[in-house]
Amino acid sequence: MDPLDLGARLAQLLATGRRVATYKLAVLDALLQHCLENPVPDDAGLTVPIGDLADRVVEAYWPQVRVFGEHGVLRQNARTQEGSSSLLDEVTTLRRDAERRGLPTLAQWRSAEPARWERLRRRVSITLAQQPLFALQRTGGREPGVAFLFDDSWLSKKVTVATLDAHGWAVELFPGVPSALARVSALLQPVVQRWWVEDVQRLNRAELDVPDLHAFLFGADRAAVAKLAPGLREFQGNRCFYCGRTLTDRVDVDHVLPWSRVALDGVRNLVLTDPRCNGDKLATLPAVDHVRDLLARPEADLQTLAAPLRWPVETARVRGAAVGLYRATTVGVPLWRGPGVYDFFDGRVGW
């Protein structure tokens, strides 16, 4: 399957009709992330647990239910009576509870409340099956179309738990689709985010500054990850992960695999850097050697660093994302090695 053809088809489909909520964009972004983190051969299909998509959708909305200046909590749904409206309400309630208890990240709350999280995850999974997954391949979300991502004939606005049980609470991506989605993700993700910003502006009927709004909706939570800086400094021997220079008081916690491509906050993907390196790297894919060094860090040491903060390590997710990102990268693309220095990708990774 040609990735560009698939991306164009998705873009045309989503551009048709007027969205009344951002949930379809959220579930598409979740699909892209899942395919990147779970690479398969080019001609293979992929089983995607709806619960995994629920995890990613809640993770996406977690930072978005904060108060946005004088506008308060932003609306992302034009309707209040349907089940989908409760999704953001639940995430908002969850975040408020977490903040009151001094648990600023979703991962920390999940660790503290596993039973409550599983109940929420199940409710969100049902909502996704009944609405955005059912509507994703339909023109304007209504008219049946030709299924080209996965068989959606068993999904509906009234899909039951019994039906979900019968299908293993999962959708089956058609052969060739997972690899194509991973390869086109670098082009499609910015488009999805632009539509998301436009939808939030329209749904709130307010003059919202686009750069500020985009950073609010999709930027990494720097304040939260900064809590890992002391542990990372000790773990790295007070040296910048990228250039090896001795660190000063001014440091940054960086996502080695860019947050804009794979929103992974696990310690496995986080390093301490000097501001010069971090400011030059930005959202560029790093040189292969940097990722190899990232993945080689001892698991036990990362677990020790993360445990006091109830922070996830997420080695499997980060390793899968590394494979998926570089498999989807074209030979010859520049990879960031250091300030002003780039390698050209030769297609070899070694992990």
Image (tube, grey):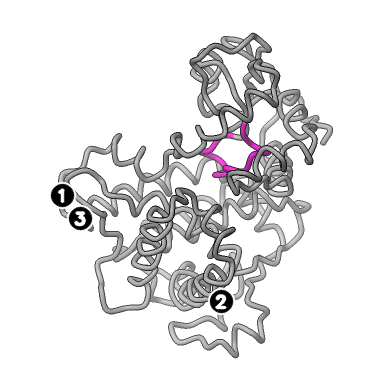
Cα distance, mark 1 to mark 2?
36 Å
Q: Is residue 267 magenta?
A: yes
Secondary structure under tag 2 reads: loop
What amino acid type is highlighted by mark number 2?
Asp
Cα distance, mark 3 to mark 2?
31 Å
Which residue is nearer to you in this view: 111 or 28? 111
Where does residue 154 sit, x and y in percent of width and height? 57, 83
* Circles 1 and 2 in contact, beta carbons < 8 Å: no
Whether residue 77 is situated above or below residue 287 in the rendered picture: below
Q: Please name the residue that numbered disc 3 is placed on.
A: 204
Which residue is nearer to you in this view: 225 or 4? 225
Q: Residue at x 62, y 20 (%)?
A: 336
Q: Is residue 9 visible?
A: no
What amino acid type is highlighted by mark number 3?
Asn
* Circles 3 and 2 in contact, beta carbons < 8 Å: no
Secondary structure under tag 1 reads: loop
Q: Is residue 249 left or right of residue 71?
A: right
Where does residue 14 sit, x and y in percent of width and height? 41, 59
Magenta-highlighted residues = 258-270
The quarter of the displayed image where residue 132 is located: bottom left
What amino acid type is highlighted by mark number 1?
Ala
Q: Is residue 207 left or right of residue 243?
A: left
Q: Residue at x 43, y 74 (%)?
A: 131
Q: Is residue 323 visible?
A: yes
Q: Is residue 294 left or right of residue 162?
A: right
Q: Please name the residue that numbered disc 1 is placed on.
A: 206
- Tag on residue 189? none
Q: Please name the residue that numbered disc 2 is placed on.
A: 152
* Circles 3 and 1 in contact, beta carbons < 8 Å: yes
Whether residue 276 is situated above or below residue 351 in the rendered picture: above
